[in-house]
Amino acid sequence: MVTAGVFLVARSGAIFAHAPNALFVVGLVGAVTAIFAASIGLVQRDIKRVLAYSTVSQLGYMFLACGVGPSRAPSSTWPRTPSSRPCCSSAQARSSTRCRRAGPDEHGRAQEEAAATHAVMLIGCIAIAGIPPLAGFFSKDEILWSAFKVGGYGRVLWGLGFVTAAMTAFYMFRLYHLTFSGSFRGTEEQATTCTNRPSS
């Protein structure tokens, strides 16, 4: 559902090819949406909110790809590589969605599950940050290169896309660090509630 608009624009590539001004509007709206949502994600401390704004930002990235040529591969590559979002969503399996490291007794017998969540979250962050060899690198690289090759307004979209990619990497690894690193940052009441939670 969330990528239906991207699919529609990409499928209408033959029409948009005859309206370069409309393509510019599509790409610009996508780039502004991407960087605006990413800027909000930078300051969130709730896992679900970070991932929600990240999704909006990546949707903007898809429209940016459509704006530099909806009939080209980049517009359909990024929607097919959503590997990072489901991986990062696994972090919500924790007792709370706040970005705070768990206390030593918070998970009880679920420590092994938390270790698996830790690994999957790291993979998701690497993927969405565009670090090779995961799919996020190849799709984002292709989108940015396609924007740069367009020239003119494409260079503007490339600049916005590049900044957005850097912001995405920052807020995702910030989310990872706040959730899995450092000392417990919750309240004593939260720690007690988690510790006394009945095991399943």
Image: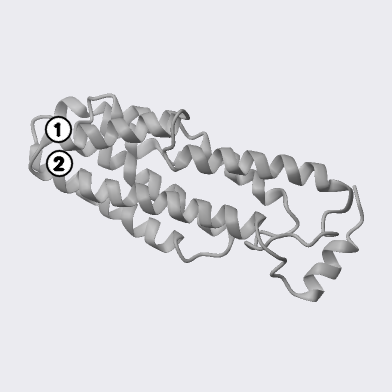
Within the image, what quadrant is residue 86 found in? top right
Find the residue positioned furthest to the bottom.
Answer: 188
Name the residue carrying label 2.
154
Q: Are marks 1 and 2 in contact (CB under 8 Å)?
A: yes
Classed neighbour count for the residue bearing mark 2: other residues with Cα under 10 Å, few (<14), some (14–19), many (≥20): many
* Left or right of 150 in this view: 35: right
Q: Residue at x 17, y 37 (%)?
A: 148
| CA distance separating discs 1 and 2 | 7 Å
Query: Where residue 149 is drawn, which disc sits there?
Result: 1
* Left or right of 97 in this view: 114: right
Q: Position of residue 182 (x, y in %)?
A: 66, 62
Observer able to see residue 148: yes
Within the image, what quadrant is residue 113 found in? top right
Q: Amino acid at mark 1?
A: Lys
For numbered disc 2, what is the local secondary structure?
helix
Q: Position of residue 20 (x, y in %)?
A: 9, 37
Which residue occupies the foreground of this view, 25 or 113?
Answer: 113
Q: Position of residue 114 (x, y in %)?
A: 75, 46
